[in-house]
Amino acid sequence: MPVVVLKDVKKSFGSLQVLRGVSFSVDKGDVVALIGASGSGKSTALRCIDRLETIDSGTIDVCGYSVSDPNLDLRRLRLDVGIVFQSYNLFPHLTVEENITLAPRSVKRMQKAEASEIAREVLAQVGLSDKADNYPEQLSGGQQQRAAIARSLAMQPKVMLFDEVTSALDPKLTGEVLKVIETLAASGMTMIMVTHEMAFARRVADQVVYMHQGRVHEAGAASILTHPTTAELSEFISNDL
Amino acid sequence: MARVLEMKLDFTAILARWQMLLDGMALTIQLAVITILTGFLIGTACAIARRSKFRLPATIAAVYVELIRNTPFLVQIFVVYFGLSSLGFKFTAVTVAIIALTINVGAYTAEIMRAGFDSIHRGQWEAAECLGLTRVQAYWHVALLPAMERIYPSLTSQFILLMLASSITSQISVEELTAAANFIQSETYRPLETYIVIAIIYLALSLALRLAFWLLGMLIFPRRRRLGTNL
Ligand SMILES: Nc1ncnc2c1ncn2[C@@H]1O[C@H](COP(=O)(O)OP(=O)(O)OP(=O)(O)O)[C@@H](O)[C@H]1O
Ligand SMILES: [Mg+2]
């Protein structure tokens, strides 16, 4: 049973058509790596899945919700979908623990003690148990990104979306964030990750979706990264080396 | 030159009326504290309304803000004063003053708060939205404090201006500090000395208010306190 299904999704910003009919689906527990050149529409596709952008035509289904339905209860969709951005977006005036407990408390109406317990769990999961009382600006980029992942996980989503979460980090910090994502993948989380880390995609992804000029140009198992069939993917990969 | 040297300042008659000065000061402080609170609430509500994607509240807030910011306070206070009484309301002068000051400072606060909310990065709003927070919750939990932190100096100045502007309410015979001065100088025939004393009192009140806001800032921005950054 697929958890996320995109069918012929089209999306324009003004006269610029960014998505020109994107289709792919993600099964429960699968890890999908969304790759492609800059401007190919990866972020836009990801944002459409969480209804941060509305689509012009086509359909998107996520966890049984029809995302393109204008009457959709967005807050219910977002209980099931977690999203992490390149720029962390932690709340600067709240401690790491307060960042994490905010949504469980105000959206799920959890008691403080229960929310703190969840915060402890997710912080342990991302290896930040000792940073609960720190403010975001006291953390390194890699730690901030892991805290942002923990904040999403605290809502116990069914799908996680990652948009180039390591692009702002240097190689050492990238490694520690990727390790967290890899553990999450191993635990059976359904994930779609936009990434430029080809080695990581090859190792972790069950499915690779290569986008080119607003379309899915090639998709398949991670092996397409070593044996691409289209010239464009082949060139994209060789540029990356 | 010679005349200046001859000029003698005599404060005894004025300082003898300290009770009157004290009462005026108390009312000035009272007016300031109350209208800082009411003005902040109205200003914040209008800032949110003006940023709303709904046309009606946005337009109402915009009209209110521009109307107030483009007319003199003295005129506003007379409109409120005569307006309320022609509608049959029998409010005391102090109540009318509180209403007029609130309306006035609310409009200026709205613009300051709006700038604060506008300065919150789009990513913060999106993060709140993606976590399932409602718009109201995003304002309350995510935007309010960082916005206030950024515009806190302007807000402080605005509220000090408000306290000083409350002197205009003496025009509708509110017996605050300036009204006390007007009365004292007419009794003592020592206008210069009277207004020098009053100016010093206003100065002291302004400094005290500034200190109070600094202390309040330490309280509501704990991150600033912990990390030792200045406002
Ligand atoms: N809100 C927007 N308004 C107008 N144009 C936009 C908007 N968001 C994205 N675009 C444009 O859509 C195109 C695709 O953008 P998108 O961010 O999806 O690409 P991407 O594949 O994620 O690229 P990158 O690897 O650089 O992140 C780009 O040309 C971009 O300028
Ligand atoms: Mg992108």
Image (spheres, coloured by chain):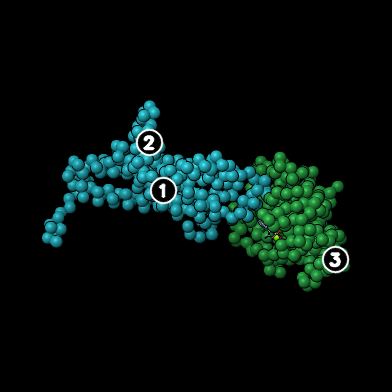
Q: Residue at x 63, y 43 (%)?
A: B134
Q: Residue at x 36, y 30 (%)?
A: B85
- Residue flagged by tag 2: what amino acid is it? Val
* Residues packed near mark 3 inside 10 Å, few (<14), some (14 to 19) or many (20 plus): few
Q: CA distance from mark 1 to mark 3?
A: 66 Å
- Asked if ligand 1 lies within 8 A of label 1, the reply is no
Q: Which hue belongs to chain B?
A: cyan
Residue under numbered circle 2? B80
Q: Is B99 rendered above or below residue A7? A: above
Q: CA distance from mark 2 to mark 3?
A: 75 Å
- Residue flagged by tag 3: what amino acid is it? Thr
Residue under numbered circle 1? B159
Q: Which hue belongs to chain A?
A: green
Residue under numbered circle 3? A230
- The N terminus of chain B appears in which quarter of the rendering? bottom left
- Asked if ligand 1 lies within 8 A of label 2, the reply is no
Q: Residue at x 50, y 40 (%)?
A: B60
Q: Is residue A134 left or right of residue A51?
A: left
Which of the two discs, 1 and 2, sits closer to the camera?
A: 2
Instruction: Name the foreground residue: B124 vs B24.
Output: B124
